C-alpha cells in the first residue's frame, strides 16, 4: 500500500531560458491530491512552458521538479494525464480508436479501458461521434475528446493547458463538474487558464504567474480574504461613466450594467452609495472581496491598463 | 507496449488507407504495363515502316529480293521471324516494306524525287515512305563506298540497322557471285551462328535467360525503391503532422524518443513489407502461369523467385528501409510544415535514386570497381548489393561486409535520430541550422 502523498507535484526554483528571455524564472509551487490548482497569467506569462516542464517535454535549465514524492520520470509518466493547448489529437483518426491509443501508450490495455471510454464519451455527450474522424468534429467537441484522452487512463495528476478554450457555456459547466468530481475522488489537477471568471468557479488554489515569475500563490479563499472587503460589486441602469468619479473609489472596472469598484483605504462604502443614488438606478450593491479578475489585474495588469488609459 | 501501441497505430493507419489498397492492387499491373506497353509500341512503330532503296548500281534488285526471303524464312530467323513484303500476310509483328527503285542512270534526279516522297503527309498514300536508302553507283567496286539513309526521324536506329544488314548482305552476295561462287555456297558463308547467354554460378550450375535476369533486376530495384520513397516520406509527413497537431507533446511526455521512433519506423516498415509481400505473391502467381505457358520456350520465370533471393530481398529491404526511415525522421523532426519537409526530402530522393541511375552499368558489369564500391557504401548497399546478387554471385565476404556496415550505420543513425528527434520535434519555429543540430546532439 502506498502512503498517501501530501504533494503530487512540487516545483523548486524552476527556471527556463529561451535565448534572452526568461520564460520561467525561479518558479516554486506545489499541487496536492484532491485539489484543483489554477495556473493563471497573461498570454506569454510562461504558463505553457511551466506545464511542458512538468510533463518532461522541456528540461528546466535550473531547479527541480518532483513528481509523486520523487519518483523517476519514466515511472511517473503513466500516472500523469496531459491535455496540451489547442489540439493534441490525430485529425484523421476515429474518436474511439484514438482514445484507446492514448490509453495504450499509458500502458492500459484497450480491452481494459473500452468500457470507461464509452462511459466518458456519453457523459460528455460525444457517444454518437465515437466512430467519426476527429476532423469532422466541432472545435468544442474536439476539446472534449481531448479531455477524455487525458483522463481515460485514470491518472493521479491531470495537467490541463487551457481546458476550457473553445467550449460553449453548457460545456464549460459540464467540464467543471467533471473536474470537480475528479478532485473529489482524490486526483490532483493543475490547469492553466486566462479566463478569470471561470477559474474563480473552478479552482481551489491559484498560482499567479507574470513574466515568468510566480507573483501570488496559495488557497484562493485565503487570498481573497487577505485582500479584505475593499470592493463594491454593483448592478445598475444608466450611464456608468460617473462611477469612477465617486468619492473614495480608487479604480473602477465598468461593464454595461455591472461594475466592480475598488475602494481606497479607509473609504466609506455608504458615501459612495449616496453619491450614486441620484445619478444611477441601483440594482445591486454589495461590499465584498475583490473578484479573481480584480486581483489578477491589480497584480499583473496595472501598468498596461494605466498606460492605455493615458493614451 | 508503448512502442507496440505506436507500431500498431502507424501500421493500421497506412494499411487501412484506400490509397494503400489501390496502390497494392494496381502496382503490378502498372509495372507490367510499364514494361509491355513501350515494347508493344516499339514493335508497332516498326511494323508500318516503308522504305525506298534507290540503287544507283541498278544491280542489286535480285540480291535484295533473295535476302528478304532469307530473312522471312523461319529456318533462318527462328520462330519470331521478320516478314518483309506484302503487309497483312506477315508471320511476325516486325514489318518492313522495301520498295526497290533502280537508278543506274539519272540517279541524282531519281533520288531527289524519291526523297520528296518522305514529306508526303498522308500515311495512307502508297507514295509515302518513312526512309530512303541511297546506294552509290560504285558500291560494288569501291571498297570505301558509303550508303546514305535519309529519314524524317533520326532516332529509328533499329530500322536503319536492319536495312543496313540486309543491303550489305545483298552487296556481299553480288561480290561473291562476281568471284564465281554458287548461290548455295554463298548461303552457307553468310549464315551467322545464333548466340545464347548462359550465366555460370560458383557452384557450376548453369542458368539461362540473361535478359530475364536483367528485367528481374529492374523490377526488384523498383520493389526496393518504391516503399523507401513512399513510407520514408510517410514517416516524415506523419512526424510533421504530429508536430503541427501537438500530438507529439503527448507522445513525448508518455514515452522515450527511442520507443516512439522505433514504433513509428517499424510500423511503417511492416506496412511496406505487407505491400511488397502482396506484390511478390502476385508476381509468383503470374510467373507460375507465365512459366507454364512459356516452358516450351526454355525459360522458367519461377527461377527468379527462389527462396535464396527472397531472403536477400527481405534483408536488403529492411536494411534499406531503416537507413532512409531514420534520415526521413530527422527531416520531419526539423521541419515545421509539409513544404519545409519537402525541401529537406528533395536532396534525399536524389541520393536514393543514384543506384537507380547507375543500375545499367552495374548490371552490365556487377563485379566492376564501381558496383563493388557502391554496394559497400551503406546508403547505397541495399539496392546495389541486391542488384549484384540478382545478376551475379558476389563473394560472400562482400555480402557479409555490406550487411555488417549497414547494420552499424543503422545503429548509429538510430541513435542520432532519436536525439535530434527528441529536441527537434519540440522546436516550433524556424528550422535549425547544421551547427544547431550538432549542439542538439551534445545536449540531448
Image (spheres, rainbow, N blue to C red):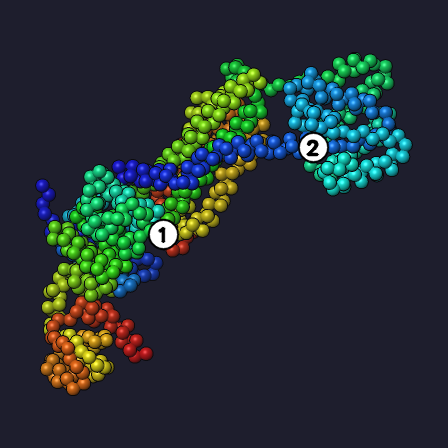
- Tell me if I can see residue B440 in this picture: no
Dots 2, 1 in contact, CB < 8 A: no
Residue B154 in sight here: yes
Q: Position of residue A11 (x, y in %)?
A: 19, 54
Q: Quadrant of residue A107?
A: top left
Q: Is residue A64 left or right of residue B149?
A: left
Query: Looking at the rendered structure, which numbered label has been put on residue B90?
Result: none
Front position in the image: A23 or B283: B283
Direction bottom: furthest residue: A278
Residue B41: horizontal and vertical position, in percent? 62, 34
Report, in whole angstroms, how far the alpha carbon at label 2 lies from the one at label 1: 58 Å
Quadrant position of residue A105 = top left
Give the SS element for disc 2. loop
Any mark on residue B48, and which? 2
Question: Which of pointers 2 and 1 lies earlier in the amino acid sequence?
Answer: 2
Along the line of sight, the residue nearer the viewer: B388 or B128: B128
Closest to the observer, B369 or A6: A6
Picture residue at 17% right of the left edge, 52% below the top? A9
Which image quarter holds the N terminus of chain B? top left
| Residue pictured at 25% horizontal, 70% vertical | A301
Q: Nearer the viewer, residue B399 or B293?
A: B293
Residue B412 position (above or below residue A212): above
Callout count:
2
Say yes or no: labels 2 and 1 on the same chain.
yes
| Residue B306 point in image, percent of width and height | 46, 21
Chain letter for mark 1, please.
B
Residue, disc 1: B244
Check the image and report above or below for B212 versus A42.
above
- Please tell me how crowded label 2 is: few (under 14), some (14-19), or many (20+) other residues with Cα within 10 Å: some
Q: Chain of mark 2?
A: B
Judged from the image, the secondary structure of the residue bearing numbered disc 1 is helix
Residue appearing at x 76%, y 29% in the figure: B98
Amino acid at each position: 500500500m502506498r502512503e498517501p502523498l501530501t504533494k503530487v507535484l512540487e516545483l523548486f526554483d524552476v527556471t527556463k531560458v529561451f535565448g534572452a528571455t526568461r520564460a520561467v524564472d525561479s518558479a516554486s509551487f506545489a499541487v496536492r491530491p484532491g485539489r484543483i490548482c489554477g495556473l493563471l497569467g497573461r498570454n506569454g506569462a510562461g504558463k505553457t512552458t511551466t506545464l511542458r516542464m512538468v510533463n518532461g517535454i522541456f528540461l528546466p535549465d535550473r531547479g527541480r521538479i518532483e513528481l509523486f514524492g520523487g519518483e523517476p520520470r519514466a515511472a511517473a509518466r503513466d500516472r500523469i494525464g496531459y491535455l496540451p493547448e489547442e489540439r493534441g489529437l490525430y485529425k484523421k483518426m476515429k474518436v474511439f480508436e484514438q482514445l484507446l491509443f492514448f490509453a495504450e501508450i499509458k500502458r492500459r490495455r484497450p480491452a481494459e479501458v473500452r468500457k470507461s471510454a464509452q462511459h466518458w464519451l456519453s457523459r460528455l455527450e460525444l457517444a454518437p461521434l465515437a466512430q467519426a474522424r476527429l476532423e469532422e468534429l466541432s472545435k468544442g467537441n474536439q476539446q472534449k475528446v481531448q479531455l477524455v484522452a487525458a483522463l481515460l487512463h485514470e491518472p493521479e495528476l491531470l495537467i490541463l493547458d487551457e481546458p476550457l478554450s473553445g467550449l460553449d457555456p453548457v460545456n464549460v459547466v459540464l467540464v467543471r463538474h467533471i473536474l470537480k468530481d475528479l478532485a473529489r475522488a482524490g486526483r490532483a489537477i493543475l490547469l492553466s487558464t486566462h479566463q478569470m471568471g471561470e477559474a474563480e468557479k473552478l479552482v481551489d488554489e491559484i498560482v499567479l504567474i507574470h513574466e515568468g515569475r510566480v507573483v501570488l500563490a496559495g488557497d484562493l479563499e485565503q487570498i481573497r480574504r487577505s485582500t479584505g472587503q475593499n470592493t463594491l460589486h454593483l448592478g445598475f441602469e444608466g450611464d456608468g461613466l460617473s462611477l469612477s468619479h465617486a468619492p473614495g473609489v480608487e479604480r473602477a472596472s465598468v461593464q454595461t450594467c455591472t461594475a466592480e469598484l475598488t475602494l481606497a483605504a479607509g473609504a466609506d462604502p455608504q458615501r459612495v452609495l449616496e453619491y450614486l443614488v441620484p445619478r444611477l438606478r441601483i440594482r445591486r450593491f454589495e461590499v465584498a472581496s475583490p473578484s479573481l479578475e480584480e486581483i489578477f489585474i491589480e497584480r499583473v495588469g496595472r501598468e498596461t491598463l494605466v498606460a492605455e488609459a493615458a493614451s | 507496449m508503448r512502442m507496440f501501441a505506436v507500431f500498431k497505430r502507424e501500421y493500421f493507419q497506412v494499411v487501412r488507407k484506400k490509397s494503400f489498397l489501390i496502390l497494392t492492387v494496381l502496382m503490378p499491373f502498372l509495372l507490367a504495363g510499364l514494361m509491355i506497353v513501350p515494347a508493344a509500341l516499339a514493335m508497332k512503330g516498326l511494323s508500318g515502316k516503308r522504305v525506298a532503296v534507290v540503287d544507283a548500281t541498278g544491280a542489286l534488285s535480285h540480291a535484295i529480293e533473295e535476302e528478304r526471303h532469307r530473312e522471312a524464312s523461319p529456318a533462318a530467323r527462328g520462330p519470331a521471324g521478320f516478314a518483309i513484303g506484302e503487309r497483312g500476310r506477315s508471320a511476325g509483328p516486325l514489318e518492313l516494306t522495301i520498295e526497290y527503285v533502280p537508278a543506274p542512270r539519272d540517279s541524282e534526279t531519281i533520288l531527289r524525287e524519291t526523297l520528296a516522297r518522305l514529306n508526303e503527309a498522308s500515311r495512307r498514300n502508297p507514295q509515302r515512305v518513312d526512309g530512303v536508302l541511297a546506294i552509290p553507283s560504285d558500291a560494288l567496286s569501291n571498297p570505301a563506298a558509303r550508303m546514305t539513309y535519309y529519314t524524317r526521324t533520326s532516332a529509328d536506329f533499329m530500322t536503319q540497322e536492319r536495312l543496313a544488314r540486309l543491303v550489305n548482305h545483298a552487296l556481299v552476295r553480288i561480290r561473291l557471285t562476281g568471284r564465281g561462287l554458287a548461290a548455295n555456297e554463298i548461303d552457307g558463308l553468310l549464315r551467322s551462328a545464333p548466340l545464347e547467354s548462359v550465366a555460370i554460378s560458383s557452384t557450376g550450375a548453369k542458368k539461362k535467360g540473361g535478359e530475364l535476369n536483367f528485367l528481374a533486376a529492374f523490377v526488384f530495384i523498383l520493389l526496393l525503391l518504391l516503399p523507401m520513397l513512399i513510407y520514408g516520406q510517410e514517416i516524415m509527413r506523419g512526424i510533421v503532422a504530429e508536430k503541427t497537431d501537438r500530438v507529439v507533446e503527448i507522445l513525448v511526455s508518455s514515452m522515450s524518443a527511442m520507443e516512439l521512433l522505433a514504433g513509428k519506423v517499424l510500423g511503417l516498415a511492416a506496412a511496406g513489407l505487407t505491400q511488397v509481400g502482396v506484390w511478390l505473391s502476385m508476381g509468383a502467381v503470374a510467373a507460375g502461369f507465365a512459366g507454364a505457358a512459356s516452358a516450351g520456350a526454355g525459360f522458367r520465370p519461377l527461377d527468379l523467385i527462389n527462396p535464396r533471393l527472397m531472403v536477400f530481398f527481405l534483408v536488403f529491404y529492411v536494411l534499406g528501409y531503416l537507413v532512409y526511415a531514420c534520415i526521413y525522421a530527422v527531416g520531419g523532426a526539423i521541419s515545421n510544415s509539409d513544404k519545409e519537409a519537402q525541401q529537406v526530402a528533395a536532396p534525399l530522393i536524389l541520393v536514393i535514386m543514384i543506384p537507380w541511375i547507375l543500375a545499367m552499368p552495374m548490371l552490365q558489369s556487377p563485379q566492376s570497381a564501381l558496383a563493388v564500391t557502391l554496394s559497400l557504401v551503406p546508403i547505397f548497399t541495399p539496392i546495389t548489393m541486391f542488384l549484384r546478387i540478382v545478376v551475379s554471385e558476389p563473394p560472400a565476404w562482400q555480402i557479409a561486409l555490406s550487411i555488417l556496415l549497414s547494420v552499424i550505420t543503422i545503429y548509429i543513425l538510430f541513435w542520432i535520430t532519436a536525439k535530434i528527434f527528441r529536441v527537434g520535434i519540440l522546436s516550433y519555429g524556424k528550422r535549425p541550422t547544421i551547427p544547431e543540430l550538432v549542439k542538439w546532439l551534445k545536449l540531448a
